[in-house]
Amino acid sequence: MDPIIILGIVLALLFNFSNGLNDAANSIATIVATKALTPLQAVLLSGVFNLLGPLLFTTAIAATIGRGIVDPSFLTPALILMALVGGVLWVLATSLLGIPVSSSHALIGGLLGAGIAGAGAGAVIWPSLAMVEQTAFYGLTGAALGAVATGIFAHRRGEFKPWNLLVGGLIGVTVAIPLAIATGLLNISGILGVIIFIVVSPMLGFIVAFVFGTTVAYVFRNYAPRRLTGLFRNLQIFSGSLQAIGHGGNDAQNAMGIITAMLLAGGLISEFAVPLWVILVSSLAISTGTLLGGWRVIDKMANRITRIRPYQGFAASTSAGGVLSLMNVFGVPVSTTHATTGAIMGVGATRGYSAVKWGVVREILIAWFLTIPAAAVVAWFCYTLAHNLIGGVF
């Protein structure tokens, strides 16, 4: 086997390891924040269910990563290797800084940067005009309906303010896009889907968690506080497991897509089909990273965004896990970090605007939107440097 392919496989597994290291916070932040489990117990729980996730879902997300961003005909083992380097460097840097970012987006940025450096912008699979127009139609329709519905509701309550229309529009887009995808009316793929869900996934997590958290609070409003705390601390173990399965099913496919693409580019397989051994080692890598934990990220997700009570932790984890599972079923690659942070913000907002520490949220948002371009720049630089130093391989 080509040494570059071997190195690429090792780096892909390292990428999944760093993904688990960074995203350990996703499925255990609320469990740690509410003291349902100790940090060690929570990390062990997350690691086990991260391993199961990829075995329960399809490998559609791996296909998007491996052949939906850069045209496979332009992919070479060396180009994929530099894409990995860019993604790994960005994820490790943000992990050290304690900033929760999307490892999936870092990898996509790496593919974009290395692809443009190696084969030009034409190598990127840009969305067709028809796909963009169709997405815009459903998005604008949802925004208009959401703004009108919210405006009417606020007006009848005598609480209408202009910003209600903006909130309603965002809610409308968040509901309309996934609904159109789920019903088969809209088919988003490649880089367009990634960009759309940078906005949609945290908003979807926010909305579902806000509604679910409000419902749970109403249903259990007459329970004694001590009884309520004990009940939902136990239920959080279930919700955290669901979230870990969704996380593993989504993010573990990053390495699966890259390794399979590298095997295909190297001529070791004849078609893009993820081998079983690739599924197993990719899952094991992300679980190992989770077991070692990303403790600084966990602290920010669990304690600095908002103060979480056990019933809210249950609502946040269940909502995020449900959103991730739904996206996995439809093969839509979303950021587990985005969905989880949105859900934590959603349950925090049930106590009012001031319950959420929006300064921390802004910091996280900036990291989200910087991830794809930053990882692309790093990967472009790595590819260009390697090409100049050892041009024969590249």
Image (cartoon, rainbow, N blue to C red):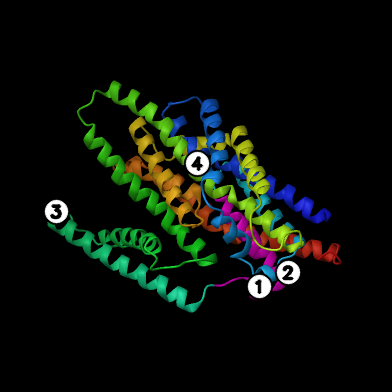
Residue at point 59%, 71% (across, down)? 125
Give amino acid for label 2. Gly
Residue at point 45%, 48% (across, down)? 325
Return the residue found at the far bottom: 129
**Residue 250 image position (x, y, % from top left):** 53, 49
Quarter of the image where one finds residue 165 = bottom left
Give amino acid for label 4. Ile
Q: Which residues are magenta?
A: 102-126
Most foreground residue, 98 or 45: 45
| SS category of the residue bearing label 4 | helix
Residue hosting label 2: 118
Q: Are marks 2 and 1 in contact (CB under 8 Å)?
A: yes
In the image, residue 305 sits, relative to residue 109, either above or below, namely above
Are there few (<14), some (14-19), or many (20+) residues within 10 Å of tag 1?
some
**Residue 202 image position (x, y, % from top left):** 42, 52
| SS category of the residue bearing label 2 | helix
Q: Nearer the viewer, mark 1 or mark 4?
A: 4
Any mark on residue 123, and which?
1
Residue hosting label 3: 157
In the image, residue 251 sits, relative to residue 229, either above or below, namely below
Any mark on residue 277, and which?
none
Give amino acid for label 1. Ala
Question: Residue 363: within the magenta?
Answer: no
Most foreground residue, 237 or 121: 237
**Residue 389 image position (x, y, % from top left):** 85, 62
